Image (cartoon, rainbow, N blue to C red):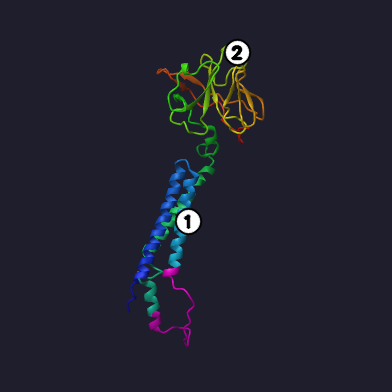
Amino acid sequence: MSARGPSATERAASRRIVAAFGASAAGAVGFAVTYAQGGNTRWEGACLAVAFAGLAVGLAVWARRLVPVGGYVEEHEGFTPPPTEQAMTAAELTAPDSPVRRRGLLAALGLALTALGAAALFPLRSLLPFDRARPERALKDTPWGPGVRLVDAAGRPVRPQDVPADSMVAVFPEGHVDTGDAPAFAVRLEPRRFSRPPAGGHLDGLVVWSLLCTHAGCPVRTYLKGTARVLCPCHQSSFDLLAGARPVAGPAARALPGLPIEEGPDGFLHATGDFTAPPGAGFWDSP
């Protein structure tokens, strides 16, 4: 006795299920790739939504279109079905196109579940006890480093003469103008006026500090000429640049981190390292 072949409706449902499981696997892979490349919450959320939605749709279509539903009542005299019915049931369950043994669907389901399981392992690396995986590393490291050129908001390299005396010029690491923890500002002061040496040193009075207030991370955009102080407009913290950029008013408790600089062979300003302390607001390891 041969089992019946799948109907057109069942074949269409099978294609929908495979497509849904394929979309689920693609979403899981997309999540893993996005997370591994640094993470973007919007894309990660979208990928996870596709992954779980595809899995849900595939299982729902499978259960509704291919698995028999409803109550079935069969009157019989004994509990053991006759040999003919046993043979028919065995043929249905063991046939290659049986809903229980559709190899293509099972393979697609396995692919989707495997991809989701593998993607779930990626966020676990943030919990590993290795320095390279600890979350605070992202709070301490910035794009600044030895040899990185200072550029303005338009991406143009900055020369020492581009910073006038007693004026504030916003600077950024080349190639990272839009990075949130990288903004800094350069100011030229008279070296003899320093009551405390700048943390990052100075280049004939030219000093660079982080632009982010150490209270809540707002940019300290206001420069008070003559007093050599910068003011944060968010909560009125004030920093004395002549005294190592230490806070002299407002809620900020830490001095602005300095950036060590030098004039490179090309005549432009280059960083010789990262900030002297983590920029912006404090956290558990940097109060």
- Magenta residues span 64-86
Q: Position of residue 193 (x, y in %)?
A: 60, 13
Distance (Cα) linking label 1 and label 2: 63 Å
Question: Would residue 247 be found to the left or right of residue 31 on screen?
Answer: right
Q: Is 27 located above or below residue 198 in the figure?
A: below
Q: Position of residue 30 (x, y in %)?
A: 43, 48
Q: Is 164 located above or below residue 171 in the figure?
A: above
Question: Would residue 15 be found to the left or right of residue 233 on screen?
Answer: left
Q: Residue at x 59, y 11 (%)?
A: 192
Q: Is 55 located above or below residue 145 in the figure?
A: below
Res 97 seen here:
no
Q: Residue at x 60, y 15 (%)?
A: 194
Question: Would residue 211 be found to the left or right of residue 31 on screen?
Answer: right
Is residue 81 on the magenta stretch?
yes
Res 268 seen here:
yes
Magenta stretch prevailing secondary structure = loop
Q: Residue at x 62, y 19 (%)?
A: 243
Within 10 angstroms of label 2, few (less than 14), some, or many (20 or more) residues? few
Residue bearing mark 1:
52
Question: Would residue 42 be found to the left or right of residue 10 on screen?
Answer: right
At label 1, which amino acid type do we have?
A: Phe
Pair 1/2: label in front:
2
- Image quadrant occupied by the N terminus: bottom left
At label 2, which amino acid type do we have?
A: Arg
Residue bearing mark 2:
193
Q: Earlier in the sequence, mark 1 or mark 2?
A: 1
State the residue in front, 120 or 182. Answer: 182
Q: Residue at x 49, y 46 (%)?
A: 42
Q: Secondary structure at mark 1?
A: helix
Q: Secondary structure at mark 2?
A: helix
State the residue in front, 12 or 72. Answer: 12
